[in-house]
Amino acid sequence: MLFKLLVLPLIAVVLLCAPFAFSARKIKTGKSPKGAFIGNLCAFAGIMLIGLIVPIGDLAASAAAEGGAKAVLTTGAGLGYLAAALAVGLSCVGAGIAVAAGAPAAIGATSEDPKNFVKSLIFVVLGEGIALYGLLISILVISNVNSVLGI
């Protein structure tokens, strides 16, 4: 049980950090980090293998049986948390796309005429507002799931 609770999550964290180490070593030596792709695939495969070995539901059930958890999570609660994560993740991706398109245009407009700075800044800020809306939706979803569970 100690192996499942301590060692396997530690291995998962190491595997999550491994691709960054591979890429940093390639960049430091002046080589292209494209060769680190194999390391990324191996780390991903290792994390997926650990995900198959560690039954997360078993750990939650054993914690609830010991009295360590207030309530046992249901499938609906898990889907609620997944919906909150998707709301934040996808809204941040959308905001990144919007800012990636708006910021260079704002810089170009400001370099041509400095009076356009405020007008162009508004479009960049509107793109970032998308991420804030996703965060707000996720807070509402999580608070609703927690109120249903009684947490």
Image (cartoon, grey):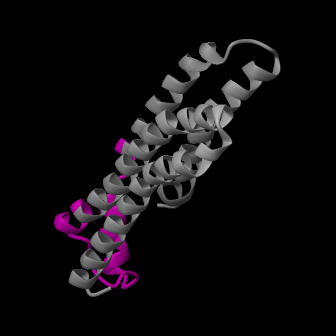
Q: How many marks?
A: 0
Compare residues 4 and 150 and report the one nearer the observer: 150
Point 28% across, 81% down: residue: 71
- Judge whether residue 143 is colored magenta: no
Characterize the magenta stretch by its predominant secondary structure.
helix
Point 56% across, 40% down: residue: 16
Q: Which residues are magenta?
A: 52-79
Residue 125 point in image, percent of width and height: 50, 53
Residue 106 point in image, percent of width and height: 56, 38
The quadrant in which residue 136 appears is bottom left
Q: Is residue 99 left or right of residue 70?
A: right
Q: Is residue 118 above or below residue 18?
A: below
Compare residues 4 and 121 and report the one nearer the observer: 121
Compare residues 129 and 21 and report the one nearer the observer: 129
Point 54% across, 26% down: residue: 40
Which residue extends farthest left?
A: 76
Q: Is residue 92 left or right of residue 38?
A: left
Q: Is residue 12 above or below residue 56?
A: above
